[in-house]
Image (cartoon, rainbow, N blue to C red):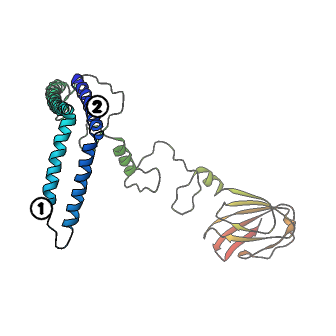
Amino acid sequence: MANIEQGIKDKEQELEEIKKQIEEALNNNDELKQKNEELKEIKNQIDEALSQEPPADTSELEERKEELENQIAELEQEIAGELINKKEEIEKELEEANQNLEDKNNELEQNEKDKKLITQKVLDITIKTLEALIDTKVSLNGDEEINGNKTFANPILVKVDPTNDNHLTNKIYVDTTLNTKANLNGDNIFNGTNTFNQALTSPTNPTNDNHLTRKWYVDYGGGIKNLGTTGSINLDLRQAQHFILTANAGTSIGIANFGGVGKSGTITINNCQNVVAFNAPFKFRIAQSGFSGTETFAYFCIASNNVRLVRT
C-alpha cells in the first residue's frame, strides 16, 4: 500500500512538471498566441451576435472558429507533441494506479470486516461458554440452594419486601415495620395490654389530667419553683405547685394562669413586709395585713376568678 501511494505521488509530480513544460513551450510561440487571440475575438463576436434581437446569423463565424481551433490543435501538437503524448501517458498510468489503490483499500476494508466478524463469533462462543460455566455455580435466573457458609464483603441488596418468615429483608422494610409498631417520633396509641419490665422514664411534668407522671412530680406535688428576688409579679401556677420568692419594696402579687380547678399548693415569700397587695383573683377569707419576714400562704384554685389564700 505504501509503495503504491508513493508511486502515485511521484507520477503526480512528474505530470505537474510535464504540464509546466507544455505551458512554457506554448506560451513562447508567437504564432500560437496570435491564433488564440483571434479565436478569443471570434468567440466574442459570436456571443454579441447571439445576444441581439433577433439573433444575427453566426454561421460564418462558427466556421472560422472551428478552423482556428483545428489550426491551434495542430500547432500545439507541432510545438509540444512529444510532451503532450508523455502527459497523456502519465495520466493513463495515474488512472491505473489510483484504481489499483482503490482496489487495495476495498480489499483491506473487507478483510477488516471479516476479522471483526470472526472476532465477534469467537466472543459469542466465549460468552456462551462462560455463561454455561457460571450457571453451574450460581444462576442469575431461577431458584438456587447454596450449601455451606458464604461470606459477603459488602451488604446484600434486597429489592423486594419479604413475604415468607424465612425471607431476607431490607433496611427500609424493617424501619417502616418498626415505625408502625412504635414510632419514636410522634404520637402512638397502644391497643391491648402492654407490660413494661423496666421503669418508664419521663423528662417532663404532666400538663393534662390523663398524662402519666414521674416520681419527682408526685413527691413534690408538681415541684417547687424558686422565682428569686422580684418586684410585682403575676404567677403562672402551671409551672409548679410550690413557689418561693424574695419580695422587693412595693411588690404586689397576682396570677397569670390559675392552673386549673382544684390545683393547690403554697407560696413562700421572703421579706414579706415588702408585699403591698395580693391582686385578684387571689382572695383571703379574712383580709390580712402586717406581713413580715418569711411567710407562707396556701392557695386553692376554685375558679379562674377565685383563688383562695390562707395565711399559715
Q: CA distance from mark 1 to mark 2?
A: 40 Å
Q: Position of residue 148 (x, y in %)?
A: 25, 22
**Type of amino acid under label 1:** Ser
Find residue 264 and report its image quarter: bottom right
User: Residues at badges 1 and 2 in contact (C-beta under 8 Å)?
Assistant: no
Q: Nearer the viewer, residue 90 or 257?
A: 90
At a point 43% along the width and 51% down the height, the residue shown is 183
Q: Position of residue 171 (x, y in %)?
A: 36, 41
Q: Nearer the viewer, residue 80 or 246?
A: 80
Counting the numbered discs, the total is 2
Find residue 173 and report its image quarter: top left
Q: Residues within 10 Å of mark 1 (few under 14, many from 20)?
A: few
Find residue 269 and report its image quarter: bottom right
At a point 24% along the width and 27% down the height, the residue shown is 5
First of labels 1, 2 by sequence position = 2
Residue 291 visible in image: no
Left or right of 157, for residue 261: right
Q: Nearer the viewer, residue 268 or 133?
A: 133
Tell me the element at label 1: helix
Position of residue 268 relative to residue 123, above or below, is below
At a point 18% along the width and 35% down the height, the residue shown is 141
Position of residue 134 relative to residue 288, above or below, is above
Q: Position of residue 255 (x, y in %)?
A: 70, 71
The residue to which callout 1 is attached is 59
Left or right of 120, for residue 299: right
